[in-house]
Amino acid sequence: MTNIGIGDKERESLGRILNVLLADEFVLYTKTRRFHWNVVGSDFSELHKFFEGQYEALNEVVDDVAERARALDVISAGSLSEFLELTRLEEDAGKHRDAPGMLAALLADHEAVIRTLRKDLETADKLTADPDVLSRRNAPTANGLSGDGLRAVARDPWVPIFGAWIRSPSRREAGATVRSPPSATARRRRD
């Protein structure tokens, strides 16, 4: 058993929060992969690369969240049935979207994860007695929701990019391009 200064009940509650977040991130990762494989149209090349950059970043986030659960001595969810049972996102199975629909769906999911993560962080604060625990960099201990890994989850750089694509269908004529934000690893190295 891990002794990190919080009780078993609180540790298990934090592990549950992390496993639900893990499920959300995995469903979002899978949806992004599917869109990468199935995007068509005049923006195919650019969106294909964009989705690839995004699912690569989400892959890192999935790994970070699972490892944070393990740092709390909680078994990380790891099966498709577990992810589908735990996720707060819609799987979107069988829906075939055009490129703007794909972007809108991913934007909605990213925004949903950010909203629920904010609530999860508030809950984690209540479960731990240390009010400074969330401000510690790279701290996979205490409430398990602190450090760079969760800053990567918040993915503030993604939201404006999706919004720009959706709001500006003629961005190619305006000379705008879409670039994926740096990966979580690159952001950590830069910080």
Image: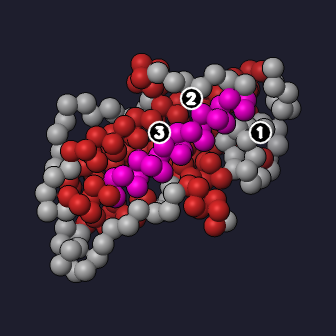
Based on the displayed image, in which of its 4 quarters is residue 142 positioned?
top right
Labels 1 and 2 touching (C-beta < 8 A): no
Which residue has dot 2 on it? 19
User: Who's the residue at 28% across and 40% down the image?
Assistant: 34
Residue sticking out furthest to the left = 41
Asked if residue 129 lies left or right of residue 117, the reply is right
Is residue 78 something that shows in the picture? yes
Please, what is the three-letter code of the amino acid marked with disc 2? Asn
Give the dominant element type of the magenta stretch: helix, strand or loop: helix
Which residue has dot 1 on it? 141
Span colored in magenta? 50-72
User: Who's the residue at 86% across and 32% down the image?
Assistant: 5
**Relative to residue 136, is residue 125 depicted above or below?**
above
Asked if residue 157 lies left or right of residue 164, the reply is right
Say which mark, if any, is on residue 47.
Answer: none
Q: Secondary structure at mark 1?
A: loop
